[in-house]
Amino acid sequence: MADIIQLLPDFVANQIAAGEVISRPASAVKELLENAIDAKASEIKLLIKDAGKTLIQVIDNGIGMSVTDARLAFERHATSKIRSAQDLFSLHTKGFRGEALASIAAVSQVELITKQADSEVGTEIHIEGNKVTSQEPCVALTGTSIAMRNLFFNIPARRNFLKSDNVELRYILDEFHRVALAHPEISFYMYNNGSEVFNLPKSNLRQRIVHIFGSKMNEKLVPINEEINEIKISGFICKPSSKKNKTAQYFIINQRFIKNRYLHHAVTSAYEGLLKEGEQPEYFIHLELDPKTIDINIHPTKTEIKFEDEHTIYALLKSVVKRSLGQFNVAPSIDFSLSEEYTTPYHYKDKTSKTPTIVVDSNFNPFKMDFETPSFQKKSSFSQTNFKKDTASWEALYTGIPSRVNTFETASVGEFDTPSLFENTTDFETTNNTILFFQKKYIITPLKDKILIIHTSRAHQRILYERFAKNINDHKAFSQQLLFPMEFEFSAMECQALASLKSVLEATGFLLEIHSKGVQILGIPVNLSESVVKEVLNDLVANELEQIPQENSLKKELLAKSLAKSSAIRSGETITQEAQQQLVKDLFSCNEPSISPFGKKIFTELSSNEINNKLS
Ligand code: ADP
Ligand code: MG
């Protein structure tokens, strides 16, 4: 049989290779903008016609090219940016493959005009389908202008694959935003079909974001800033809002936009409990790292990168985001996320164990359910104490921490510490006769001109969660020794999971011994009922065995959640009127009263207008 293999002609090979780099107008836009930045331009103009299908032109005031370079630039693997593969690890430019201009020239009609600062004249080159059709000196300003016309003019099949102008323009805008957000120090202009779309003067990042996304965004921005171990994190995260679909999520590493699901997870988990189901956080996060510690050479269009030490970046990022959310009163200012690497490690030996003092109230009469001795009639953690006393004992746990919990007697209407997300709480009126406990599930109470319907169990979860969280984080947990140690069986795998949770559990007040077949619990956190211990441990082990990355911070958070869930009042349980009022008050002393630690809505409102409408 005859030989059938042959080498592809250059122009076919080029077209195929070009497809990898230039798949649509937006990819050409990205490459041209990045070349202009690499050329140190301080002002870049992007001109588009028909969503880039007819024309994409980028004009910069950068360093320009010499006559020979201008010609060479269009050769495949022609680059001024690296000399050897080693240079990839000290990369300070966007480009390095030397493929973009060759690809662009392979699939469109290109006109290049360029001039270096010290040259008298510039160079003008025309190329069509990789063939130079003309080259001559010309009058030009310093910098470079590259115009590419009729994208895919020579590959009709690919041209047919392009989407509608609207869609392609959206892709272009995405790329433009990414580049503009990575470089607020450069002025960018964009024109579409002759009209100005963006005029972004040189500015700082906040102004750049506002210029692109509008002034509404300004109010949402919460700055972040941290520099540890040669990792610098800066930029902004956004206060949670009800945006579900297209959200602004930008990671910019060494001024290059990247996508990274792992880092996205770090940010999302820092928002845990603040976003309702389906909601996405918005962020503009700049990271600066030593180029040696990242590898960007894994994707032709370079939006994905590898990190040498992903875990540290994950932990740091989560901690920084969480802290900023807390500082700006967006979230509980619980700094779980400080992983052990960044905080003084917890040493159990440093803790002085304290035996809780027991005060016996000789006047206590469990059958007298009046104002003085409200009783939480539930079997779990509060079974033997009243709600008010419980609050007091909690406060005792965080001596030295300014308490946000007002006691019933002293709190006057205006005294509530109003969380920023919930501005109406100052108007909360608590009087004995305005609370209704509906179906043993909802607390219904008036608030200004509205009626609030509060999910009791979720509200209690939120209150307990914030308290446990603070407690764990401040290492202020107290243990109650068990008279009769509890014994639970666990599989070998589960025991391993427990072993890795041990230090976190101890930080909460657990005293435990893990052996090969299970665990022996010698002490549990004060205020935790023995009856929920098994549930809490099961919860934690199950989470630990899941594949999600878990540093100690996450474990602590899960523990606080689990403790809160197990100890909270459940629907169907009865609580006294006094406890109901205390609960409402405690809820609105929380940092985040509207969402349960599990992301569920805690209350809903009915305005007087709505009531009027219903009755008209
Ligand atoms: P890469 O950016 O990967 O080096 P390109 O094909 O994008 O490859 O560009 C090839 C070379 O052309 C670059 O290395 C650079 O030297 C030169 N070049 C491209 N665009 C410009 C520009 N706008 N200004 C100055 N030089 C440029
Ligand atoms: Mg390039």
Image (cartoon, rainbow, N blue to C red):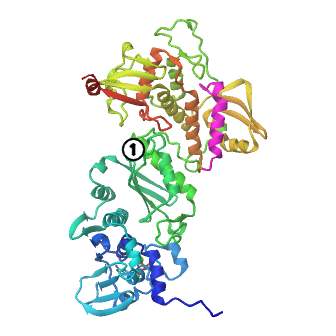
Is 289 above or below relative to 463? below
Q: Is residue 546 magenta?
A: yes
Q: Tell me which residue sits at (29%, 57%) in the image.
A: 207
Is 421 above or below relative to 407? below
Q: Position of residue 523 (x, y in %)?
A: 68, 29
Q: Is residue 405 visible?
A: no
Judged from this view, the residue extending furthest toward the front is 1
Work out which quarter of the rendered image holds the C terminus and state it. top left
Ligand 1: quadrant of the figure? bottom left
In the image, taking residue 312 as reference, residue 523 lies left or right, namely right
Task: Please identify the quarter of the rendering in which residue 350 is found.
Answer: top right
Q: Dot 1 corresponds to which residue?
A: 240
Which span of residues is magenta-colored? 525-547
Q: Which amino acid lies under the numbered mark 1 shown in the image of this protein?
A: Pro
Is 41 above or below relative to 216? below
Label 1 secondary element? loop
Judged from this view, the residue extending furthest toward the left is 195
Q: Position of residue 451 (x, y in %)?
A: 34, 24
Mark 1 Cα within 10 Å, few/some/many (few <14, many 20+)?
many
Front residue (pair 425, 454):
454
Q: Is residue 413 visible?
A: yes
Q: Tell me which residue sits at (61%, 34%) in the image.
A: 508
